[in-house]
Amino acid sequence: MGQHARPTVTPLAIAVLALLDERPMHPYEAFQLLIARREDILVKVRPGSLYHTVARLADQGLVQAEGVDRDGNRPERTTYRITESGRETLRATVAEILRNPAREYPVFPVALAEAHNLPAREVLALLRERVERLAGDLADVETMSQWAGGHAVPRRFWIVLPYLHATIAAEIAWVNNLISELDSGEMEWDEFDPATGIRIPGHEHAWSAAEHPEPPPAPRGWSETSASPP
């Protein structure tokens, strides 16, 4: 790729490039294979977005149309193969992600940071519902891990499953601890009018209205004038 900047690829594009690195295939086959392998737990997979991703990869020179085939009365399907540039981009991108933890800004921490805008009772109910859903996700991961182990799938193809299991289990444990702290009254909380859901004036914590001339220290590597890494 010489001195040119490496193309930026999305998580779905990484998955598509990895499939085409195995063998050439048409986009719908790639979609079916991603679903069959349950990679939809890692990236959002939709037929429309996958076709768009393949078209973008072709525009970037990372994949190339190889031929067109037709199965019975079905529409013609174009088969794509990965290019050398695509293979380079795939390997370099995976290496970069493995090397550097990225600031990904998931939405759950945002909701946690703003949970004080809801009554404590409502937050408790919502968190308990979250734990139930996480428990279902954990069970799904356990089932997939058992299947992979039982079918002698080489570990290198499913090392992500123990990672997902560990992260989901850790979140369940953390949220359960938060539920206990909030339910016991150990954590202070503003009072809300049960009828309107509005915070009751005079009952909010003084910290909420306080002025803080000195902000908390910025994370390492962040610009002092920007919310983004330099």
Image: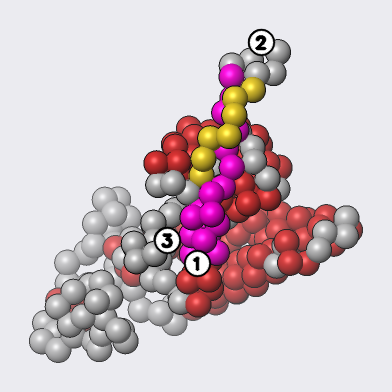
Question: Mark number for residue 73?
Answer: 2
Where disc 1 sits, the SS reads helix
Left or right: residue 19 compared with residue 212? right
Name the residue rendered at 66%, 10% in the picture. 73
Q: Where is 190 relative to 12, above or below?
A: below
Residue segment shown in magenta: 76-93
Q: Is residue 156 visible?
A: yes
Left or right: residue 124 compared with residue 225? right
Q: CA distance from mark 1 to mark 2?
A: 40 Å
Residue carrying label 1: 92
Which kind of residue does numbered mark 3 sit on?
A: Met
Left or right: residue 14 compared with residue 200? right
Tag count in the figure? 3
Name the residue rendered at 49%, 34% in the picture. 51
Name the residue rendered at 55%, 64% in the picture. 91
Residue carrying label 3: 1
